[in-house]
Image: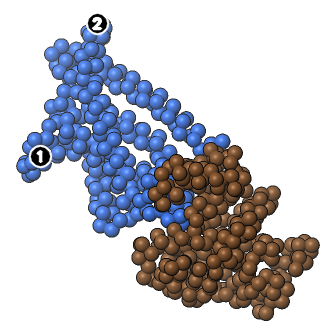
Amino acid sequence: MDTLNIDYMLGLLPVMLKYLPLTLKMACIGMVAALVLASLLAVVRVLKVPVLNALTIVFISFFRGTPLLVQLFLFYYGLPQVMAFLTQIDGVTATILGLTLHFSAYMAESIRAAIVGVDRSQTEAALSIGMTNVQLMRRIVLPQAARVAAPTLMNYFVDMIKSTSLAFTLGVTELMGATQKEAASSFLYFESFIMVAIVYWVMVEGLSFVQRWMEKRLNKAYQR
Amino acid sequence: MIAVRNLVKKFGGQAVLDGITLEVKQGEIIVVIGPSGTGKSTLLRCINFLEQPDGGEIQIGERKVEATRASRHDILGLRRSSAFVFQNYALFANKTALENIAEGLIVVNGWPKAKAHQRAREILERIGMSEKADAFPAALSGGQQQRIGIGRAMAAQAEVILFDEPTSALDPEWVDEVLELMKQLAVERQTMIVVTHEMQFAREVADRVIFMEGGRIVEQGPPSQLFSAPKDDRTRAFLRKVLDEVPPQCAEGI
Ligand SMILES: Nc1ncnc2c1ncn2[C@@H]1O[C@H](COP(=O)(O)OP(=O)(O)OP(=O)(O)O)[C@@H](O)[C@H]1O
Ligand SMILES: [Mg+2]
């Protein structure tokens, strides 16, 4: 094995850091949008809203049942051919859209499970003082479900950060795309890709640290 | 005034409430007794529409609702003019004692938070729980949780408070503090319908005791009459059974 070109690796760092914000931006927007959508889907499932419930089941089944890469290609390359207004869509938007829909399907199921897990007496107490279904979801059930679902949702966020790397297949120059370009011109593939792996790794570990801290805080709330 | 007319509720084809008719005047304290599985909880839950009745009519104040034709608006209206105290307290686990009491005022009545918290503090004061304002339910004893449960019902300023065995999940040491609070409400002539096995409470506090069996009201009357001279054999049998289980000095009260 040839010796590693450490100087080259360190030199890559500033280039990578320049593209890191785009990666984080896609992951964060995707996460927030997926959370909102997933909560709505979960509530529709729990309340068994007519028609919407059936549509939601199909939606979840589709986005869980097909690869994310296929979904991204479908949005970016496929849909504009049949829906003219989508020709404007750029790689970043397509990625965010794909991540949102894909992960919301998974997250909806864990939120739904957490909602169903909230004791029935909580719902009855809320109903008995005259809250509407929407009110009791927002004020009582969802906050309690969030506590239960939080660790799982954090895992999906980690997964989402890593999945942003697929954006490079849509021609987006984010962390992975930038690394790929560097590697192609320097031919130092190992150095480049081990470096990008480390950057993802550090990012995810940092997040896990935040996660543990958050869980501690969340759990403290209901205890003596 | 609260009135229930010909109320029917079926579970799996079987009538658990078999035509209940009951009128409760404002300020009246009703105690409902009867064997297990007789439909006592179901009666309270139907009045609050936690169960959808299969027939009959429910009236609270001016609002008269035919059970099978109740609109969303009717149901919310009935729930807002009645309050429920649960056997297992059912406090909101994600809210403090204070927030549990203020929640309905904020969300249902649309009060500003400050005003609702102010009222909740007054209620905490009345139920002797001011010190625990910021405690979460998990940090409270059963008796304290149930007092907060009653406080939450008081905040609603409902026409009637429905109590479903409010002390039967409690360790014996906490029963008295909850009964005391209920007596205090009775003195203030808060209309209430109480399902309980606490016969002593029924004797002392009730204006009228109702004996239910098999989804029907078998007999009703003032406690002095019902406990000492029940007319129906079934009432007599039931009373003999429950009063045998308590020490004689309690049983001889009246
Ligand atoms: N959700 C339900 N589904 C099916 N059956 C039910 C349901 N709720 C109550 N029942 C049945 O209805 C009958 C009356 O129940 P209810 O809880 O009203 O009795 P109760 O008089 O309150 O008894 P207890 O003193 O044990 O609390 C029982 O036979 C019970 O099994
Ligand atoms: Mg019961």
- Identify the residue at horizontal 52%, vertical 57% (top origin): B105
Above or below residue A220? Residue B64 is: below
Residue B4 location (% of width, % of height): 57, 84
Q: Is residue B90 visible?
A: no
Q: Quadrant of residue B87?
A: bottom right
Which residue is located at x 47 percent, y 40 percent? A151
Which of discs 1 and 2 lies nearer the camera? The answer is: 1
Which residue corresponds to mark 1?
A86
- Asked which secondary structure carries label 1, the reply is helix
> Disc number at residue A94?
none
What's the colour of chain B in the image? brown
Q: Quadrant location of residue A55?
A: bottom left
| Above or below, A9 relative to B3 | above
What subunit carries mark 1? Answer: A
Give the vertical position of B192 relative to A90 (above or below).
below
Parent chain of label 2: A
Give the residue drawn at x 49%, y 82%.
Answer: B64
- Secondary structure under badge 2? helix
From the top left corner, tell me how far across and down residue A116 is, in percent. 48, 57
| Ligand 1 has an atom within 8 Å of the beta carbon of the residue at disc 2 | no
Chain ID for blue: A
What crowding class fits label 2: few (fewer than 14 Cα within 10 Å), some (14-19), or many (20 or more)? few
Give residue A26's position: percent from left, percent from top: 27, 34
- Most extreme residue toward the right is B249
Q: Are marks 1 and 2 in contact (CB under 8 Å)?
A: no
* Pick the front one: B159 or A158: B159
Q: Which residue is mark 2?
A: A7
Amino acid carrying label 1: it is Leu
10 Å crowding of disc 1: few (<14), some (14-19), many (20+):
some
Mark toward the start of the polypeptide (1 vs 2) = 2
